[in-house]
């Protein structure tokens, strides 16, 4: 798991370091860092919302298919895939942006957890020496990490080291590369309104001082900002798809549950993570709101026609290449033939002879469709011999 954190954390760390060197305030650096990452993800967000808008145009046709093949799920799935192929729509297109954003979060966590590495850029030997010293002090004074050893594989070892340094700065004077001076300067800027963003918020702090109140507010603000995004998404969904199926209730519950989960996680992680989530949600809202304004009905109809024409031209120029939906259709046909679906279009069970005939007809239709797709002539006179 540490490998995944570092894989994304290293390049994002350079980005964060660059921003911090320009604006030497950690809270402001996080805001700018979040803005830059959102700009990097904008092409993926654009593609996701364009795909969602195009799917919305298909909804009447999808609803018609669901009514026509309500008793034949296999045929329904096949017809839906054919429709997606004809329209040049990939229903799985939103998965990649979601995966990228989730992957990006690992890097953000690594950057926030390891400011000594990613922002101060101190060598590994110096960082490990500081962690060892902090671990000794934690065991000796019992005031950091519950009085337990600070292991180097603990994701929070740098934040715990900073906490120990804050309590016993004189003990770190012999660490090389001007460790004490650099960390002292950085600690002064590692705050927002005096609250250390490296600390974990708590509902039961030792003292309800200014810092404790600010830290405690961050998770709730993270939840509220996420709630803003969820409520807007629900409102937009109802506006664009008023005939949503009853199953949307589960989706609604999940969208409202997400802010509560954000609050819970923000109380388990350093305040810097929650602070990042606040601005990430706000920037996400602005991006989503702006793209929804951009993708008007007329504009998405025009875009849809261009995308369909583009897919048609590409298929003609590259007949040997199969699209995602073509592969899905072929795989579904192979699976159907292997399993031998025994239900007619009306939902009635087929006899063995009827099933064999249906399988032969399905194979013929698949071959005819592929031949038609690639401009070949299909002769089925010998098809029954296969």
Image (spheres, grey):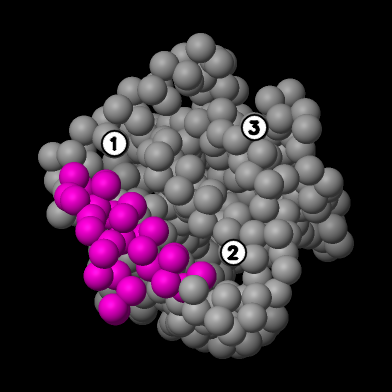
Give the numbered dot on residue 311.
Answer: 1
Q: CA distance from mark 3 to mark 2?
A: 20 Å
Q: Residues within 10 Å of mark 3 (few under 14, many from 20)?
A: few
Q: Nearer the viewer, residue 59 or 137?
A: 59
The residues bearing labels 1 and 3 have C-alpha atoms spaced at a distance of 22 Å
Task: Give the mark, 3 or 2, whose residue is nearer the N terminus.
Answer: 3
376 sits left or right of 384 in the view? left
Nearer to us of marks 2 and 1 is 2
| Element at label 1 | helix
Q: Would residue 360 appear left or right of 200 to someone viewing this image?
A: left
* Residue 231 location (% of width, % of height): 76, 33
Q: Residue at x 72, y 38 (%)?
A: 230
Label 3 close to label 2 by CB (< 8 Å) = no
1 or 3: tag closer to the N-terminus: 3
Residue at x-position 68% and y-position 40%:
63
**Does label 2 or label 1 sit earlier along the sequence?**
2
From the image, tell me which residue sits under label 2: 74
Q: CA distance from mark 2 to mark 1?
A: 26 Å
Circle 2 — which element?
helix
What is the magenta range?
358-386
Front residue (pair 151, 224):
224
Q: Tell me where residue 138 appears, x and y as whole percent.
A: 59, 81
Tell me the tag on residue 264.
none
């Amino acid at each position: 798991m540490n490998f995944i954190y570092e894989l994304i954390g290293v390049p994002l760390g350079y980005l964060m370091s660059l921003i911090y060197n320009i604006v030497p305030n950690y809270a402001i650096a996080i805001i700018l860092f979040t803005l830059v990452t959102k700009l990097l993800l904008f092409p993926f967000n654009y593609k996701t919302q364009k795909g969602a808008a195009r799917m919305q145009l298909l909804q009447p046709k999808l609803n018609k298919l669901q009514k026509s093949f309500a008793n034949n799920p296999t045929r329904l799935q096949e017809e839906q895939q054919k429709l997606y192929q004809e329209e040049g729509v990939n229903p799985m297109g939103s998965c990649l942006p979601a995966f990228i954003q989730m992957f990006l979060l690992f890097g953000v966590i690594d950057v926030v957890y390891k400011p000594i590495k990613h922002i101060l850029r101190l060598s590994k030997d110096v960082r490990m020496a500081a962690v060892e010293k902090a671990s000794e002090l934690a065991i000796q004074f019992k005031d950091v990490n519950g009085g337990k050893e600070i292991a180097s594989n603990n994701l929070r070892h740098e934040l715990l080291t900073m906490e120990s340094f804050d309590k016993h700065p004189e003990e770190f004077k012999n660490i090389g590369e001007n460790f004490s001076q650099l960390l002292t300067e950085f600690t002064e800027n590692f705050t927002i309104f005096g609250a250390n963003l490296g600390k974990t918020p708590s509902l039961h702090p030792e003292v309800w001082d200014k810092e404790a109140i600010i830290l405690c507010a961050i998770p709730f603000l993270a939840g509220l900002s996420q709630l803003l995004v969820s409520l807007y998404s629900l409102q937009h969904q109802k506006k664009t798809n008023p005939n949503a199926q009853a199953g949307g209730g589960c989706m609604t519950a999940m969208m409202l549950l997400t802010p509560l989960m954000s609050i819970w996680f923000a109380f388990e992680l350093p305040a810097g993570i929650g602070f990042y989530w606040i601005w990430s949600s706000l920037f996400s809202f602005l991006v989503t709101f702006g793209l929804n304004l951009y993708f008007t009905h007329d504009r998405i109809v025009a875009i849809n026609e261009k995308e369909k024409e583009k897919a048609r031209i590409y298929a003609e120029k590259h007949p040997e290449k199969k699209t995602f939906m073509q592969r899905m259709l072929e795989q579904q046909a192979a699976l159907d033939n292997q399993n031998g679906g025994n239900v007619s279009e009306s939902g009635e069970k087929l006899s063995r002879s009827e099933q064999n005939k249906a399988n032969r007809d399905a194979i013929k239709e698949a071959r005819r469709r592929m031949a038609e797709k690639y401009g070949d002539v299909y002769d089925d006179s010998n098809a029954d011999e296969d």
